[in-house]
Amino acid sequence: MIKKKICLLGVSAVGKTSLVRRFVHSIFSEKYHSTLGVKVDTKKLEIDTKSVELLIWDIHGDEDYKPIHLNYLKGSAGFILVVDGTRAKTLEKAMQIKDKVINAIGEVPFVVLLNKADLQDEWELDPEAIEALENNDWWIKPSSAKTGQGVEEAFYALSEELING
C-alpha cells in the first residue's frame, strides 16, 4: 500500500475540519470546532488499481498571530488550500500560504477548494482573480462540506496527481 501525507491549509473558519470530516466520515456538523495544532485522519482509496492510504493533516488556521508551524509540513506529498467563498481575504491569504509551503518543502502538487459553495449568494470572491489563478495551472473547484459538493473530487484529483505525477 502506498502512503501519502497531505495537509489541509487555510485561515481559521474556512472549513478545513468540516471538509476532512465530510471526506473521511461522510458527516457534517454546523458546530464550529477550532483545530488546535494538528488533527490527523486516514482514508484508504483505490487510484488506478493502486491502494493508497492518505494521511490527512488538518492544520490549525494560519493567522498573523498564530502562523502555521512549518514542521507540520515536513514529509507532505501535497496539500489542499481551502478558501472561504464568503470572505474574499481568505483567497489572498491562501496565496501567501502557498508561497510559505513551497518555500518550506518545495514544489508539491496542490488543489484549491473554494468552500461554502452552498452559500454562493454570499460569495465575495472575484471571478477574475480565480480565473487568473486557473490560467496559472491552479486546480480550483467550488466545494461545500455541508452538501459534499466537490469534496471527494478534490481529494481524488490530488491523490491521482500524487500517484501518477
Image: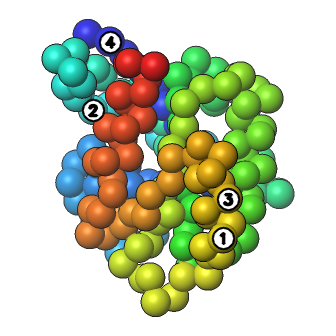
On screen, residue 141 versus residue 43, left or right, reads right
- Comes first in the chain, label 2 or label 1: 2
What residue did someone put label 2 on?
43
- Comes first in the chain, label 2 or label 4: 4
Task: Name the residue type under label 4.
Answer: Ile
- Comes first in the chain, label 3 or label 2: 2
What residue did someone put label 3 on?
132
Looking at the image, do the residues carrying marks 1 and 4 touch, with CB atoms under 8 Å apart? no
- Comes first in the chain, label 3 or label 4: 4
Element class at badge 3: helix
Looking at the image, do the residues carrying marks 2 and 1 touch, with CB atoms under 8 Å apart? no
- Mark 2 or 4: the one toward you: 4
- Mark 3 or 2: the one toward you: 3
Above/below status of 51 relative to 100: above
Task: Name the residue type under label 2.
Answer: Lys
Q: Quote the CA–CA distance across marks 3 and 2.
A: 32 Å
- Which residue is outermost to the front? 135
- Mark 1 or 4: the one toward you: 1
Q: Residue at x 32, y 37 (%)?
A: 156
Q: Residue at x 22, y 15 (%)?
A: 50
Element class at badge 2: strand
Q: Quote the CA–CA distance across marks 2 and 4.
A: 12 Å
